[in-house]
Amino acid sequence: MTAMPGLTARWSLADAPDGAEAALADYVAETSHARFSALDGLRFKTWRMRSGEWFEGCYVFVDDAARDAFQVSFTETAAESPGSQLIGSSPVLIEPCTIVAVAEGAAGFAAPARY
């Protein structure tokens, strides 16, 4: 197997309104997790956040075509995306990348809608 295509989308939380972080976690748990769990061409997505600094989606796709199609579609609507609406600004970064490897630890992989 060759390296997998990935994509990172990051928003700044520096000027986000109060409660944005909790609203983002609720949105992921209640809506976004299910949407991406059923997305054709996506191997997995991880949502990451650093309080007061940034919120990020990290996507891993089955091939370049799936990543490229998603990137074009997302970039066109990023300013109106639910994340942008909750944060109050568009992503500061939408960047393709290469996933070199993924390791599943001895504790196993868990994919709940909220940790």
Image (cartoon, rainbow, N blue to C red):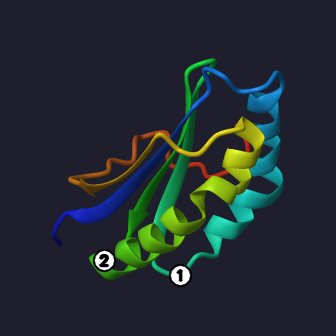
How many marks on residues? Answer: 2
Q: Can residue 102 be spotted in the picture? A: yes
C-alpha gap between disc 1 and disc 2: 11 Å
**Residue 14 vs residue 35, the one in the foreground:** 14
* Residues packed near mark 2 inside 10 Å, few (<14), some (14 to 19) or many (20 plus): some
Is residue 59 shown above or below 66? above
Report x, y in % for residue 114: 73, 43
Q: What element carries label 2?
A: loop
Query: Residue drawn at (44%, 72%), measured in percent from left and top?
Result: 72
Is residue 56 shown above or below 96? above
Residue 40 got which mark? 1
Q: Provide the residue designation for mark 2.
A: 63
In terms of image quadrants, where is residue 43? bottom left
Query: Residue drawn at (72%, 38%), measured in percent from left and top?
Result: 88
Q: Can residue 113 be spotted in the picture? A: no
Is residue 32 shown above or below 11? below
Query: Residue drawn at (40%, 61%), measured in percent from left and top?
Result: 60
Give the side of residue 107 with respect to residue 34, left or right.
left
